[in-house]
Image: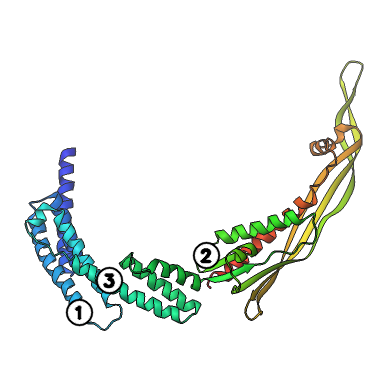
Amino acid sequence: MIKRLLILALTTAILSACSSGKRLLENGQYDEAVITAANRLRQDPDNNKAKHTLKAAYAYAKDFHLKNISNGMASQDIYKWESVVNDYTQLNMLSDEIRRCPACLSITPNPYYASTDLNQAKNKAAETRYALGEKSMQANTRNEARQAYEHFLACKRFVPNFKDVSEKIKEAKYQATLKVLVEPIPMHSNLLKLSNDFFENKIHESLTRMADNEFVRFYTQPEAESMGLKEPDHVIRLTFDDFIIGQTSVKETVVPCKKDSVEVAKDRDGKPIYGTVTAEFHQFKKVVASTGLLDFKVMDKKTRATITNEKFPGTFNWFCEWGYYNGDSRALSTAQLDLSKNKEMMPPPPQDLFIEFCKPIHEQVGNKIRAFYRNF
């Protein structure tokens, strides 16, 4: 039974494939019809429908592409050689499909294959793109350099080693890229200098990973100097308007505690005597607040005009809690008992507090830069 079902499924698939190849032929999808028929003949070399479809479809496909090539060569379209390359490539692909199928070769023994003609067309297409790239570079603008970059990339796709196209690609990419200098953040406190450097490094790390726009590059001051970048397009200036580190406050809360039905003693017979127990719980909470406000500014280096300006706040509150009690510990809650075991703690050093309140600022700055430069 299973064997019969498998034979039936295979027969259905073959008939379906033959039918689909015929439909493709009738719909004028000659290339697809050739591929479908060739695939079928690899599985079933004696399939007459597939043979008929292949013979007719390949004749139509060959005629279609050769006419396109002839019309393309006579065209005034500047990109005409690219369409010629596409048609030659498609013809070669069909030829490869047929050559990989012995049954197909018995029907079309000499499929058309263009080698020299294709290479010549690729060279023509590469020459056109190269010339367009050089012309765009002469305009000496970022937008034109970006177009030149695309032209040189297309040239390299047609002929990878065409002239000095690899160097042209690098040159065009550099000219098309918006160069942004991120100035060092001023810090007058020696105690916080390392923390400030850490914050700066986090900003630069996020900018390095930013891939939203390949035509924007960010430079640190040392990078700009080492690369000889004297005139960036934009300058990002980050300065702290103000920050407060370690503003400490301690709050004491006195809570009267009472619990009923607690065993307080036993009678003469050893039975428990229940009563009420009380205590006074002293709860302390120490908060060490650190806040800062960063001024973010993007300026046009040439005009010195401010392009965008925004302020980003950051806050971090470190705290610890402890307590003690007077009275019967049984009157306390579990949380109060736990707090009574705690001791007052020393807050982190100022350098760590600085880093912590800068974390939300770092995120805001990264989001702002990403959004601002996405479409440049």
Q: Is residue 65 left or right of residue 297?
A: left
Residue 73 x, y percent position in the rendering: 21, 79
**Label number found at residue 301:** none
Q: Nearer the viewer, residue 43 or 116?
A: 116
Residue depth check, mark 1 versus mark 3: number of the one nearer the observer? 3
C-alpha distance separating marks 1 and 2 = 41 Å
Task: Answer with mark 1 or mark 2, whichever residue precedes in sequence.
Answer: 1
Task: Answer with mark 1 or mark 3, whichever residue precedes in sequence.
Answer: 1
Kind of residue indicated by mark 3: Asn
Q: Is residue 166 left or right of residue 115?
A: right
Evaluate if marks 1 and 2 touch, with contact meaning CB atoms under 8 Å apart: no
Q: Quadrant of the N terminus?
A: top left
The reply to whether residue 29 is in sight is: no
Q: What residue is shown with label 1?
A: 71
Evaluate if marks 1 and 3 touch, with contact meaning CB atoms under 8 Å apart: no
Reply above or below: 94 against 310.
above
Q: Nearer the viewer, residue 3 or 146?
A: 146
C-alpha distance separating marks 1 and 3 = 18 Å
Q: What residue is shown with label 3?
A: 123
Kind of residue indicated by mark 2: Asp
Colour style of the rendered protein structure: rainbow
- SS at badge 2: loop
Q: Residue furthest top?
A: 269
Residue at 90 percent of width and 30 percent of height: 275
Residue 189 x, y percent position in the rendering: 80, 59
C-alpha distance separating marks 3 and 2 = 34 Å
Residue at 6 percent of width and 56 percent of height: 106
Q: Nearer the viewer, residue 160 or 292?
A: 160
Label 3 Cα neighbours within 10 Å, binned few <14 / some 14-19 / many ≥20: some
**Label number found at residue 212:** 2
